[in-house]
Image (spheres, rainbow, N blue to C red):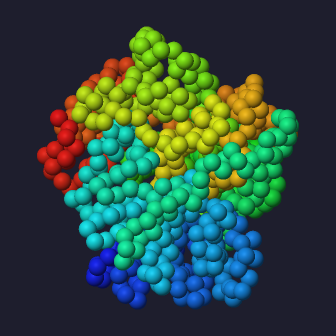
Amino acid sequence: MCGILGKICYKGKVSVPPQLDLLNHRGPDGRGEWVNASSNVYFGHTRLSILEPTPAGHQPMSDASKRFTITFNGEIYNHHELRSKVPAVNWRGASDTETLLELFATKGLEALPLLKGMFAFAIHDSVDNTVLLVRDRLGIKPLWIRYQNETCSFASEVRVLLEPDEFVPTKQALSEFIGFGRMPLSGEIFVGIGEVPPGGWVKVSCNSGIETGTWWHPTVATSTARQLKNRHEHEHKIKELLTTAIEEHLISDVGVGAFLSGGIDSSIVVMVAGQILGKKLQTFTVGFPQKTLDERSIASKVAKHAGSEHYELEVSEDTCLGWVKEAVLKLDLPSVDAINSYIVSKAVRNTGLKVALSGLGGDELFGGYPSFKNVPFLTCLGLLPKTISQVFVKVMPGKMKEKLYGIPDFSPAELTTARRRFTSVKRLRGMNLEGTFPSIPVMPAGLDTMGAISWAEMYSYMIPMLLRDSDQMSMAVGLEIRVPFLDHLLVEEVLSIPQRFKKGSGVKSLLVDAFRTDLPPEVYERPKQGFALPMEEWIRGPLAEFMDEGILAASDLLGLAEPLRLKEKFVAGSLHWTRVWLWCVLGHWLTKHVAASKYQLSTHLLVK
């Protein structure tokens, strides 16, 4: 896992290379820089050595013919298998970077569908002087791109592409953050800056402009998976695919560990990985002195079953409070839900581990969220005339009424997205912000209601929030997190399974039944809990001053009374802590990055 950046000049030369030091935390084990023969293309790379830690894995890397040069962030889990597709190469080392580079040199864009992994990379072609930017299917790894005057720049993090006086988010970005607690999936975060889309590519030519394309088409999700005859066959297929994915995700030249919360998803990952690695697998459960907030006892049972080398990492309250503040100040982009990721990553990285498996993705695919129960009922509103459905919305309980106000339709995707709302459409419009609903990619044809909810949870929540948080918070401490549940073959298969096979008496029924014989009953015979911090208690106590600073900064810099109004409601006990924490995070992020004056920021965003 690494940090990458680059700059392409359409006219002239790269006079001032981008500042690579800003990405040192993503790759503390090494760094490299490269400029093409015409001196108008620059690549930079900071390295976290996982595969081929010797100099043979150094980047930027050129292929044997010297035509192509790559800067690459990620892991290709099937890279040993792919080497057989380019048999004429005299391999210099055992890195997946070299495999990817030589495969691309042989097959071009046709190489991309062959890849299994998480990745973001740039490849320069010296023959036509172009740079191809590519991102993995589900956007596990970030790739930001900026178009400015006569240059194009790219990087693993947004802040690398901005000067201090340019940290002014677009109106769309600010609206989505206040509305949903995270920055948008698509569109400009800052003027001229957005992401290469998941499963997409951008080709930048120094001579003829920019081309874009999609190399992973979502329609494959319903066309490649087999329609099996009964539930037992689906269970067998799911177990086979997930087991293969976990095994592939264990490839490493350094130690591999796993987060173990005691929940269904992380427990399955650990059980399968333990069968393969045994004591070579390290598992980690992060706990606190407040025993009601952690799941160490169940996690310990799972680790014992798996045969892993298990560690219980207890973090003191004082340490954790310091890490909460630290996490907020390390955010590349603000997020209301990133703190847990940072604390777990920091605790595990402090043990010396570089690679950890996560159960992220299991809830989205197999129905682990309340949306899978609530949304099917709410879709009935779409069968009514619009005037009548609006009446039903008006008489709903306050929170649901605010979430659904202004919803374009009552489709499963729109309803699933609406349930994640933090700030109502009315409130956003009252702040002169955009009260729109986030756009997500068009769903594959033929998805049923449960498949549509999964799709919306992935593209409106998992990718723009959970995966971003996982990347920026783990890489802030130099830890690589791998997510085997997001193996694309598994994702395609699960999306295509009819919901009658996925539903059952318990949460994530199909997944549990597929691995029931492998798991201790305590894992699936209890309510879903998850890793939780006592944030409300802390915000009212030891984090109160930190909260006040963030709230005041947000109100002052944006010229808004809303943060102060919500703080009063929270103090009075009539508001959930996340609603004020959102403004606290935003205020501290703006304070750190925005060098523009209050007048410039509020005027640019048209906030009154």
Asked if 568 appears above or below 597 in the picture, the reply is above
- Drawn side of residue 162 relative to residue 299, left or right: left
Residue 337 image offset from top left, x and y in percent? 46, 41
The residue sitting at the left extreme is: 599
- Drawn side of residue 603 relative to residue 185, left or right: left
Q: Residue at x 44, y 17 (%)?
A: 386
Image quadrant where one finds the N terminus: bottom right
Image quadrant where one finds the C terminus: top left
Asked if 256 appears above or below 505 in the picture, the reply is below
Q: Residue at x 81, y 58 (%)?
A: 276
Residue 477 image offset from top left, x and y in percent? 49, 60
Q: Residue at x 58, y 89 (%)?
A: 65
Residue 539 image offset from top left, x and y in percent? 38, 34
- Counting the numbered discs, the total is 0
Asked if 473 appears above or below 130 in the picture, the reply is above
- Drawn side of residue 434 relative to residue 61, left or right: left
Q: Residue at x 53, y 43 (%)?
A: 442
The reply to whether residue 604 is visible in this rendering is yes
As rendered, which of 575 and 279 lies closer to the eye? 575
Asked if 59 appears above or below 271 in the picture, the reply is below
As rendered, which of 286 and 333 lies closer to the eye? 333
The reply to whether residue 485 is visible in this rendering is no
